[in-house]
């Protein structure tokens, strides 16, 4: 159980980067961007291809981020310059990316143009590079010995992956918090709230939308690149339903931790991604559920995350009304008693 939860937390932290990208489009820009399902694979395919061709994993990851940024900008251009519906522009770009991703992974094959998957079993990744440095510190043995002394029989082979993805995600959160408070970040937030108002201040909303979509998909592609290196493979179908996973993370986090400030909201999104992976890991341990049920479990989690807060808010509202009615009733009784004595 502990190892399953540990792996869920590791994956949750990586997927949290993707969830932050989804938050930028759906919550900040109010743009239903379905490019995510394609740009996630673009990041994975680009990083995996470059790693397999012998490039440094960090360079491969940076190029994957740029590829995701370009994909997001293209969606923004289709919407703003081509006047295509936001939902449709995302779908069109997602479909186009399917073929583009096959082409990218096909660069590693000599006899075919496209390739549906790439294994990275014997390739150096960001995580293997960091692990070679981490193993010399002796921290793994110290932590695992401590866990064994308090009763944990099965312990992780290494804590290096958790540490590196945690550092990366925290840095991205801090950068996102800072960016959304800058002049450009505030303009993007205002564009999502009220385009007409921000246009009245002579702001170019088309450029802001394109930039916002580019940054969002850059984060999504970054997450895809890390997942490819974490799971040691890239597949053209690994992005299916990714937008639902991102929305589930955002909704769960907001429902539990709230959205009063930007700092709190970005933390909620990250925590929501981790909680989602933990719920998924626990659900898959149920006997009658299988790994093929992941999409169904995801849909159920999103439905519950959307419906439960409504019931909770209605329950709180009923309690407030009942309390208010009881207070008014008490005041009336006191007033009536005072009039009777008079």
Image (spheres, helix red, strand yellow):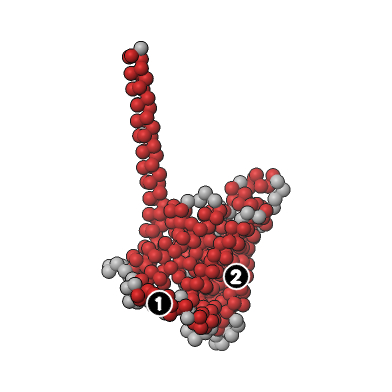
Residue in the foreground of this view, choosing between 342 and 112:
342
Query: For residue 65, which numbered disc appears in the image?
Result: 2
Residue at the image position 63 percent from the left and 67 percent from the top: 70
Q: Is residue 149 visible?
A: yes
Rendering coords of residue 306 (x, y %): 41, 52
Rendering coords of residue 239 (x, y %): 48, 69
Residue at the image position 47 percent from the left and 84 percent from the top: 121
Rendering coords of residue 188 (x, y %): 63, 53
Task: Tell which residue pokes out farthest to the right in this image.
Answer: 202
The quarter in which the N terminus is drawn is bottom left
User: Counting other residues with Cα less than 10 Å from the Cα at mark 2, is it few (<14), some (14-19), or many (20 or more)?
Assistant: many
Q: Which residue is mark 1?
A: 144
Residue at the image position 29 percent from the left and 67 percent from the top: 286
Query: For residue 318, which numbered disc appears in the image?
Result: none
Residue at the image position 49 percent from the left and 61 percent from the top: 270
Q: Looking at the image, tell me whether mark 1 or mark 2 is earlier in sequence order.
A: 2
Residue in the foreground of this view, choosing between 28 and 209:
28
């Amino acid at each position: 159980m502990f190892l399953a939860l540990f792996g869920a937390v590791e994956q949750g932290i990586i997927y949290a980067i993707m969830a932050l990208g989804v938050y930028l489009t759906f919550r900040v820009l109010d743009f239903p961007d379905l490019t995510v399902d394609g740009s996630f694979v673009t990041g994975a395919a680009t990083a995996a291809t470059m790693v397999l061709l012998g490039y440094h994993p960090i360079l491969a990851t940076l190029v994957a981020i740029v590829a995701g940024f370009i994909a997001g900008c293209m969606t923004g251009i289709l919407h703003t310059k081509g006047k295509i519906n936001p939902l449709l522009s995302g779908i069109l770009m997602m479909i186009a990316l399917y073929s583009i991703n096959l082409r990218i992974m096909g660069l590693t094959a000599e006899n075919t143009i496209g390739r549906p998957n790439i294994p990275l079993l014997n390739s150096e990744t960001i995580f293997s590079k960091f692990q070679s440095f981490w193993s010399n510190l002796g921290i793994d043995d110290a932590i695992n010995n401590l866990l064994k002394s308090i009763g944990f029989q099965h312990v992780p082979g290494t804590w290096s992956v958790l540490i590196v993805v945690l550092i990366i995600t925290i840095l991205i959160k801090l950068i996102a918090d800072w960016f959304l408070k800058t002049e450009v970040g505030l303009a993007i937030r205002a564009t999502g709230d009220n385009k007409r108002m921000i246009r009245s201040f002579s702001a170019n909303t088309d450029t802001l939308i394109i930039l916002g979509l580019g940054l969002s998909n850059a984060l999504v592609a970054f997450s895809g690149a890390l997942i490819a290196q974490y799971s040691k493979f890239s597949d053209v179908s690994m992005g299916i339903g990714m937008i639902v996973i991102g929305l589930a993370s955002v909704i769960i986090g907001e429902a539990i931790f709230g959205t009063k400030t930007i700092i709190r909201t970005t933390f909620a999104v990250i925590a929501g991604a981790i909680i989602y992976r933990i719920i998924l890991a626990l659900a898959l341990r149920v006997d009658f559920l299988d790994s093929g049920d992941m999409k169904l479990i995801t849909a159920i989690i999103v439905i519950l995350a959307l419906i439960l807060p409504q019931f909770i808010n209605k329950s709180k509202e009923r309690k407030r009304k009942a309390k208010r009615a009881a207070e008014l009733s008490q005041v009336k009784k006191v007033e009536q008693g005072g009039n009777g004595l008079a």
